[in-house]
Amino acid sequence: MSEQLHFLPEYLTAHLQLTLLALLFSTIISIPLGIVATRVTWLEPPVLAIAGVIQTIPSLALLAVMVPVLAAFDLQSIGFLPAIIGLTLYGVFPVLRNTVTGIKGIDLALKEASRGVGMTAFQQLTMVELPLAMPFIVSGIRTATVWVVGIATLSTPIGATSLGNYIFSGLQTRNYTSVLIGCVAAAILALFLDSLVRAIEVAIIRRRRGQLAIALVIVVMLYGYAGFTLAAPMIDGRQRPVIVGSKTFTEQYILSSVISLWIEHETGRSTSLVQSLGSIVAFDALAAGEIDVYVDYSGTLWANEMGRAHEKHVERVEVLDEVSQYLEKKHGITLAATLGFENAYALAVRAVDAERLDLHNVSDLITHATRFVIGGDYEFFARPEWLEVQETYGLRFREQRTMDSALMYQAAATHAVDVISAFSSDGRIVAYGLQVLKDDRNVLPPYDAVILVSARLVNDDPAVVEALTRLDGVIDVERMRAMNLRVDRYGQAPSTVASEFIEELLTTWSR
Amino acid sequence: MIQVKNLTKLYGSDIAVNALTLTVETGERVILVGSSGSGKTTTLKMINRLIEPTSGSVSLDGVDTSSLPAHELRRQIGYVFQQVGLFPHMTIGENIAVTPTLLGWSPDRIIPRVDELLELVELDPGMRSRYSNELSGGQQQRVGVARALAAGPRVMLLDEPFGSLDPLTRQRLQKSFLSICTGLNLTTVFVTHDMTEALVLGNRIGVMRDGELLQFGTPYELLSQPKDEYVYELMSTPQRQAALVNSLVTGKPTEPVS
């Protein structure tokens, strides 16, 4: 609990920055747009329709889609910018709708009176229409506030730190304390900001000037804090920290922590973690230099980046060599170290079934597949390796179910599915009484865990790269399984497991 | 002096006001009467260009109203609305001060002016910091009149200003209004449905029907020499009502008014 709460100031501040900035932009866009829509009457239906449609896009998808969109424009596509743009788009609709409703709802007699007393069109807007519509507009901002605070938790997978870091990493590592802290903190923040905007709304309606002034001072202070904390790293001019990325599963959380602690210990450089990135997002972020280092797997790069999943019987060393050369040539990415274990995709079944049905190899599954349900993680069924496995073995399962990788092992153990796309380094294979089937036709490539370093870091600080190469071969598969299990099964924090590993490593080496 | 010449308003092919010509002398109160849809409110609103005429012209003291921007024209003309239209987010004082503020008067000039106007419309000066929803209908319309008078216009337009008030309040406001008009020598066009109000307040009355000005003259002329049956019916309403009331008091059946 306390090791989790340690992150609260960082996550909360980041969450506040995202929320406040997105709301500011939403408001700045929506109010003028709403005013124009009430003036140019033919604009109103399309403008409201477009804003409404944006609202119906699932929020996670809206944020995720910002990544390729920004990348296409050569802009920062990971982290703060895509999150801010996505959240801003989300906040536009309620403010826009209420601006339009508020202005259109004004008594026609008052509109005529404002002309009758001699106001120009602009004076009618600023002296009568906006003040009278203000309670509606503020109420729209209030709706947007609550939505944006909630949706900002989904900024984590696109690389922006938020309270979602608690939720995503907690769900992956089955640390429900972490999930709870994230949810409760987001809820409290939402309630606080909601009551603040509510106070402004009431103060306007009831004409309580004192209350309005106090609420506005608090708003200004919050923006001041967010602005200051955002600007501080730019102003103090220190070297940017080495940014260590991780994908969305336990092993990645542990390894990113190991790398970050190692760099800090060996080089004294500060680091920062960008966790819970999607698989492709992580690679693109490294290629673009938005993160500096992360761990990937040779087979994944071989299949996804190089498109060579169809090649059979490839050797571990051969794949490593080719991947390394390809990354260097194509993206300037350096393969700094091979950690010493594989985390391969492997089909696993319950050990009891394996014994009962005499299953040892994947080809033994062929006759049983039509009765079996297979479970896979979010990407597995879309990956080229799976298509190759299906084709080569002629496997046709009764049903395919996509689920979170954290839940697959339990799903197999409890008979919810019969076969899973297990990760060979996951300690839960043994812990849940499962057995890996041998890829007897050598379809799946080897998946060596490798530390990848961005071209930018290689240029800026070769000492860091040199330190990372010393991690070559330090983790064997048993070690990795044990570390994974400590997080997945015994609820330890990835950072704790990582720091113990570093200590052990240093003790061993100093002997 | 207001000179209206051949004023016409068309909505598509519908004629709201048809080639209306009339002159309101300085200091005169002209009352426009007629049934709903006769074009009297449209005529009134064309004078300060709340409605732009299709054709024809209006001039104030010889100046064509289309020669200056509409908002500047309206600042020179007081307008009292049927629904009052006080701005609910402004205090009574701010409502009264709105046109002087638009004209750029300094606060030293506005503050005493607001007090003066509150006094003129017989309201307590303490009301200046209240809001319109705290006032009765009669008080609101007094503020409406004060707001119209604030910048010292020579011309006042009133659209059924006392229509929604109870009879006693209406009478009191009519009396105040009459003394204000005479006191300030205002040139006034006043639209009403109420024939008694028209007869009591008007120097001259214009009877409108289907966008046309049927007859225009003093109350005496209209009562004694009605141009047609419609004008006669309309103008004799107060007398018929009085006779009916009288018969209820005396117990005698009503006799038709000759």
Image (tube, coloured by chain):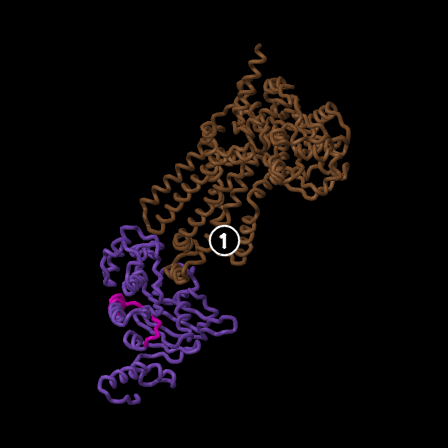
- Report the front residue among B244 and A378: A378
Tell me residue A385's x, y (percent): 71, 35
Tell me residue A341's x, y (percent): 66, 23
Q: Does the magenta stretch include residue A71?
A: no
| Mark 1, other Cα within 10 Å: few <14 / some 14–19 / many ≥20 | some
Q: Which chain carries label 1?
A: A
Q: Dot 1: what SS? A: helix
Height in image: A103 above or below B29? above
- Report the front residue among B164 and B180: B164
Q: Give the range drawn in magenta.
A: B177-194
- Tag count in the figure? 1
Tell me residue B92's x, y (percent): 29, 57
Q: From this viewpoint, which residue is outermost toward the front?
A: A356
- Please report the residue visible at 68 percent of the width from the left and 44 percent of the height from the top: A399
The residue pinned by badge 1 equals A36
Height in image: A263 above or below A138? above
Tell me residue A156's x, y (percent): 54, 36
Q: Quadrant of residue B161?
A: bottom left
Height in image: B38 above or below A306? below
Which chain's colour is brown?
A
Height in image: A106 above or below A408? below
- Please report the residue visible at 29 percent of the width from the left and 50 percent of the height from the top: B107
Q: Is residue A390 left or right of residue A145?
A: right
Q: Colour of chain B?
A: purple
- Report the front residue among A221 and A422: A422
Q: Is residue A307 left or right of residue A209?
A: right
- Disc 1 residue type? Val
- Please report the residue visible at 43 percent of the width from the left and 69 percent of the height from the top: B57
- Report the front residue among B78 and A312: A312
Q: Report if residue A351 is visible in the image.
A: yes
- Please report the residue visible at 31 percent of the width from the left and 59 percent of the height from the top: B133
